[in-house]
Amino acid sequence: MFYTPGCSACTEAREQLRLSAEALVEDLEWRELNVLENLDHAVELGVLTLPAIVIDGELVFTSMPTVPQLHEALKQRQTGTG
């Protein structure tokens, strides 16, 4: 998850999203990257707005998803339909 310090949307939802994703996907590697410290990597992935969520190296969400939206994206990755 790419975020910027002071982003209220990021702070409010990221813990809930992380916990629900970890409950859904065994051995999930959840990383939170400050875009100011990882700008080159963010640009490489096409991140233009924040917060942004990348799954398996692909930019999937350019705004904060709901828990059900994140679950659906993760399930698609697990089954290979995404």
Image (cartoon, helix red, strand yellow):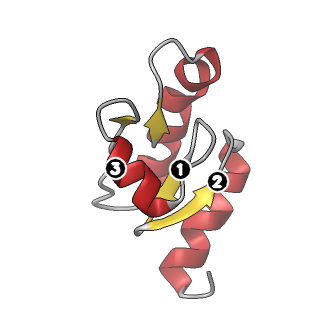
Disc number placed over residue 79 in the picture, else none: none
**Quadrant into which the N terminus falls:** top left
Tell me where residue 59 sits by quadrant.
bottom right
Q: Is residue 32 visible?
A: yes
Element at badge 3?
helix
Choose the circle earlier in sequence order: 1 or 3: 3
Q: Amino acid at mark 1?
A: Ile
Q: CA distance from mark 2 to mark 1?
A: 5 Å
Choose the circle earlier in sequence order: 2 or 1: 1
Q: Is residue 30 visible?
A: no
Residue at 33% over, 57% down: 28
Please tell me how crowded label 1 is: few (under 14), some (14-19), or many (20+) other residues with Cα within 10 Å.
many
Q: Amino acid at mark 2?
A: Phe
Please state which of residues 51 and 16 is positioned toward the viewer in this rendering: 51
Determine which residue is flagged by label 2. Answer: 61
| Residue contact between numbered discs 2 and 1, judged by CB atoms under 8 Å | yes
Element at badge 2?
strand
Disc number placed over residue 40 in the picture, else none: 3
Residue 20 coordinates in the image, percent (x, y) = 52, 43
Q: CA distance from mark 2 to mark 3?
A: 18 Å
Tell me where residue 13 sits by quadrant.
top right
Residue 14 coordinates in the image, percent (x, y) = 52, 31
Please state which of residues 72 and 82 is positioned toward the viewer in this rendering: 82
Q: Amino acid at mark 3?
A: Asp
Residue at 71% over, 54% down: 69
